Image (tube, grey):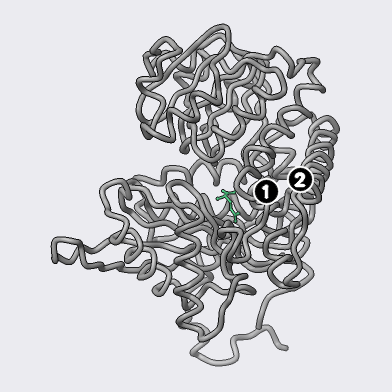
Amino acid sequence: MSGKPRSSRTKLQPSPPAATHALPSYLDQTNLGPWSTYLQQVDRVTPYLGDLARWVETLKRPKRALIVDVPIHLDNGEVAHFEGYRVQHNTSRGPGKGGVRFHQNVTLSEVMALAAWMSIKNAAVNVPYGGAKGGVRVDPRLLSQGELERLTRRYTSEIGIIIGPTKDIPAPDVNTNDQIMAWMMDTYSMNSGETSTGVVTGKPIDLGGSLGRRDATGRGVFTVASEAAQRIGLKIEGARIAVQGFGNVGGVAARLFAEAGSKVVAVQDHTGAVQRAAGLDVAALLAHVAVRGGVAGFKDAETLDPADFWAVACDIMIPAALEGQIDAKNARKIKARMVVEGANGPTTPEADDILGDRGVLVVPDVIANAGGVTVSYFEWVQDFSSFFWTESEINQRLVRIMTEAFAGVWNVAQRHKTSLRTATFIVACSRILQARAMRGLYP
Ligand code: GLU
């Protein structure tokens, strides 16, 4: 090659993409929300990635983002339109994997961040998946059961062009459950002409679901919290626990802590907050929530102003609700020795720094709440082999994976003197980018 332009056409081509380092133009640049948190986390890990850092741009944009219109007939005969998304952040290590949330505040940039955190989480516990996430911008509490089913089915049909048992496998997340997974599985199966159990996880047991899946995220939170507590000399027995969010993650984690002899001293959810210094009766609180839909009005407790929740005297704080809950303002109030993230993205980067400076250990989402997707992986493997494991086998395997993954992350944090979040990103991003580098670019 002479090094000269081969034709005049070459000269006319635009100079190579400034866009390579820019934010995707389809995002609202003024309101990036959790996506900006995620990007800052990637920037923090980049200096530790060595040669692999040359591929890091891959992590800063999703592989694929689908926006769909979800029109449904309401019970009153009107038609309503909802906005749905499915984002596949990365598939270098395997198919996309991650939940679907139904929430009135869902946005594309939020789903992008949640999909990216799935890539990191799946690589951190070394399950053979990339990362994906979906969502519909809807408050499901305002829908009847029939409307919810029609919404779920139409959404599934719309994203059906990119999901599949070896392409991208949805699961439950905020405000979605095993019934919704059953409708998703059925809709996908009807469209594809075969019963495809492996297209979603978190299904009912009778439809190819896995024992232990429902409790798995909370069990993982408890397991990782216990491992971390042991390393900082904190005893789980007698430890005071505060939990934000009392659903599938916070509720189960609280129950397991109580069973292990901890005192659950405060719980906050979307209905309010309650506290009891001697420890709440978690079983009674769960029963109350099952009937009343939230913790508000629970009799055997004092009412707590939700604004005071973060300042509660406790040893372990478990945010298990939504993103961005612990920010620069309330991070200074937290009295706990550890924050264990049951939710995805609950802590902003500024709050991370404040907690770190104050000596509060943050056990990040991407390892702490990975128990759910780990048992999702078991469910998917069981569906493929049509051979199902016992609950004790599942729980043992879950605890082993979580314990080993946490030990690996802990050692990396010690070696590099970083936060556990950056250490988890070091482990996970190295795995993803190694796969990326080995696969190379197509074409
Ligand atoms: N939604 C859960 C999470 O954020 C579980 C995802 C899955 O099982 O695929 O990790």
Name which residue lies at 58% across and 18% down: 264
Q: Is residue 244 left or right of residue 356?
A: left
Counting residues from the N terminus, which is met first, the one under dot 2 or under dot 1? 1
**Residue 232, position as x, y percentages in the image:** 79, 18
Residue 242, position as x, y percentages in the image: 55, 20
C-beta proximity under 8 Å, tags 2 and 1: yes
> Which residue, given by chain and number where applicable, does mark 2 sit on?
395
Give the residue at mark 1.
Answer: 212
Q: CA distance from mark 2 to mark 1?
A: 7 Å
For the residue with label 2, is its CB less than 8 Å from the closest atom of ligand 1? no
| Count of numbered labels shown in the rendering | 2
Against 90, is 6 above or below? Answer: below
Density class for disc 1 (Cα within 10 Å; few <14, some 14-19, many ≥20) is: many
Residue 195 percent coordinates (x, y) = 56, 79
Q: Quadrant of residue 257?
A: top right
Neighbours of disc 2 within 10 Å: few (<14), some (14-19), many (20+):
many
Q: What amino acid type should be assigned to the residue bearing mark 1?
A: Gly
Q: Which residue lies at the image location 40% right of the left edge and 13% below the top edge?
A: 304
Give the left or right position of residue 427, taking residue 274 as reference. right
Between 392 and 251, the one lying in front of the other is 392
Mark 1 secondary-structure assignment: loop
Against 241, is 170 above or below? below
Horizontal relation, residue 334 to residue 443: left or right: left
* Position of the N terminus by quadrant: bottom right
Residue sitting at x 26%, y 48%: 142
Q: Which disc is residue 262 wearing?
A: none
